[in-house]
Each structure stands twice: as C-alpha cells, then as structure tokens.
Amino acid sequence: MQEEIENILHREDITLAPTKKRAMAFFIDEMLLSFLLIFALWDSFSQAKTMEAMINLTNSFVLEYMMMKIIYQAFFVMQYGATIGKIAMKIRVVEIKTLDNPNVISSLNRAIFRVISEMLFYLGFLWGMMDPLRRTWHDFTAKTLVVNA
C-alpha cells in the first residue's frame, strides 16, 4: 500500500509536507483557537483573580473547546483542504484516493481522531513522525495525506 501511494505521489508530482511545516501549522492553529476561546470568555477571564481561577475556568470549558477544535478542523479541511495554519505554511490535506479535498465524512473523522490523539498524549502525532508517509492516526483513519500545496 505504501509503495502504491508513493507511486501515485511521484506520478502526480506531489510531495509530502515536512514535519516542521506540519508542526508550525499545528502551533498557528492552536494559538488561533486559544485566542478565540479567551476572546469568547473574556468577561470570565477578566474576573479571575488568580492563576488557579483561570485554570479552573479553562477546565470548565474543555468540552466546548474540543467541539470548537473539531468544527474548525472539519470545516476548513473540507472546504479549503487546509486550516488557517496549513494555509499559512502552504500545505494541505488530500484524500489518498482522489488527491482532492477530503469530503465531509473524512474531514469530520480526521478532526475527531485528531482530538482523540491529542487527549492520548499526542501519540498519534508521534506516530506520524515515524511513519514513512508521515501519516498520523487521524490521517490513517480518514485515509488522507498532508502534502505541499
């Protein structure tokens, strides 16, 4: 299967996105979503007087934050083939079969398993660093690759 994918990529002159670009895109997306959460909860954050109060406030919205991440990832990957971070780093997500933007189901699957991978100590991301095609767990489940745009 791996050799087949490599042949398709070579034939179509598509290159895999480097791990450094993927990591930077991840950082950009995480910062963006964190700022959105703080902005949405600014009244509550401004009333928190201690670091403990801020941590408790953040923990009380963890499910909402996870849903925000899933919606963000699924929408942008389905619509544009990339999140804002990936667009900034000039990389994109493609379905292996079509080499096009993932459909709704694949995008949602990828977004959900991305959050699950984060909850499991980022093991799925570590897996992607060791995989020859740089596929993370969420890439495996959604049958996607991250390539240079």
Image: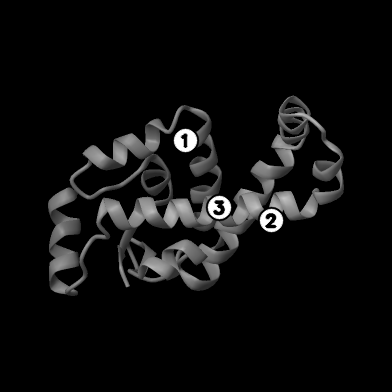
Mark 2 residue element? helix
Q: Is residue 70 left or right of residue 53?
A: left
Q: Which residue is mark 1?
A: 117
Query: What x and y, as percent, mark residue 143?
Result: 37, 52
Q: Is residue 144 visible?
A: no
Colour setup of the view:
one colour
Query: What x and y, as percent, mark residue 64?
Result: 73, 43
Circle 1: residue type: Ser
Circle 3: residue type: Met
Query: What x and y, as percent, mark residue 45?
Result: 80, 42
Contact (Cβ within 8 Å) of mark 3 with mark 1: no
Task: State which tag comes first along the sequence, 3 or 1.
Answer: 3
Contact (Cβ within 8 Å) of mark 2 with mark 3: no
Task: State which tag comes first along the sequence, 2 or 3.
Answer: 3
Mark 1 residue element? helix
Residue 31, numbered circle: 3
Q: Is residue 17 left or right of residue 93?
A: left
Task: State which tag comes first along the sequence, 1 or 2.
Answer: 2
Q: Which residue is mark 2?
A: 36
Query: What x and y, as percent, mark residue 131?
Result: 22, 41
For marks 3 and 1, give the CA distance.
Answer: 18 Å
